[in-house]
Image (cartoon, rainbow, N blue to C red):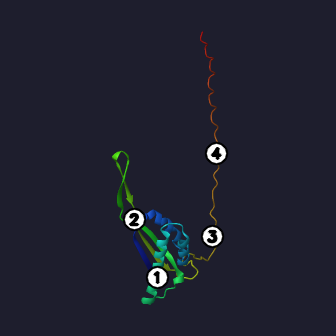
């Protein structure tokens, strides 16, 4: 089952949020919390709080709905930062002109899920029994010898300049 937490209208550009979210995607919740705790980005404390909220949502579902959820086996399944509305702003420019710029806003969503087995690699590794696979045979192509460049023309000798009398 998936447990989500959302953070809407964050005054940080989605590009900056994605830099931090890429650090925690696919990690166990404990590792992700440690990563966010020591990340040197301004958005990291907000994402830490959001991840804690997602864990608490999982605890709530475990207690209230009677689901058997092991919080130690939760991992970050999805972490997304989407664009929100943009605030248009104007800055004075030289010669009476104006520069237009946009302040970006993001919507962040984190989804947690429980790993199927305790080894941390649920469904990722499959063993195949039978004859060993044959190695693919590569054909080696011979390269043609390099062609020599034709000799460059030598510039004509310059005549000595005439002296003025």
Looking at the image, is mark 3 or mark 2 nearer the viewer? 2
Q: Earlier in the sequence, mark 1 or mark 2?
A: 1
Q: Residue 44 at x, y = what percent?
A: 50, 70
**Residue depicted at x 47% and y 63%:** 16
Residue on which the image places disc 3: 133
Q: Splitting the image into 4 quarters, where does residue 35 fall? A: bottom right
Is 160 situated left or right of 97 in this image?
right
Q: Earlier in the sequence, mark 1 or mark 4?
A: 1
**Residue depicted at x 53% and y 75%:** 33
Residue on which the image places disc 1: 56
Residue on which the image places disc 2: 105
* Between 112 and 52, the one nearer to me in the picture: 52
Give the Cα distance between marks 3 and 2.
Answer: 52 Å
Mark number displayed over residue 12: none
Give the Cα distance between marks 1 and 2.
Answer: 26 Å
Q: Splitting the image into 4 quarters, where does residue 147 fall? A: top right
Label 1 sits on a secondary structure element that is helix
Q: Are marks 1 and 4 in contact (CB under 8 Å)?
A: no
Label 2 sits on a secondary structure element that is loop
């Amino acid at each position: 089952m998936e447990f989500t937490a959302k953070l809407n209208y964050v005054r940080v550009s989605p590009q900056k949020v994605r830099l931090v979210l890429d650090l925690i995607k696919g990690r166990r919740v404990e590792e992700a919390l440690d990563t966010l705790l020591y990340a040197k980005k301004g958005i990291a404390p907000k994402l830490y709080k959001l991840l804690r909220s997602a864990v608490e949502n999982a605890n709530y579902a475990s207690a209230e709905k009677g689901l058997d959820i092991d919080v130690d086996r939760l991992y970050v399944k999805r972490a997304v930062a989407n664009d929100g509305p943009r605030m248009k702003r104007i800055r004075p420019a030289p010669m009476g002109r104006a520069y237009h710029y946009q302040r970006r806003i993001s919507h962040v969503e984190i989804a947690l899920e429980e790993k199927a087995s305790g080894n941390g690699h649920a469904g990722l590794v499959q063993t195949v029994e039978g004859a060993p696979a044959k190695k693919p045979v590569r054909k080696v192509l011979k390269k043609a010898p390099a062609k020599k460049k034709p000799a460059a023309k030598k510039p004509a000798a310059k005549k000595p300049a005439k002296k003025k009398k």
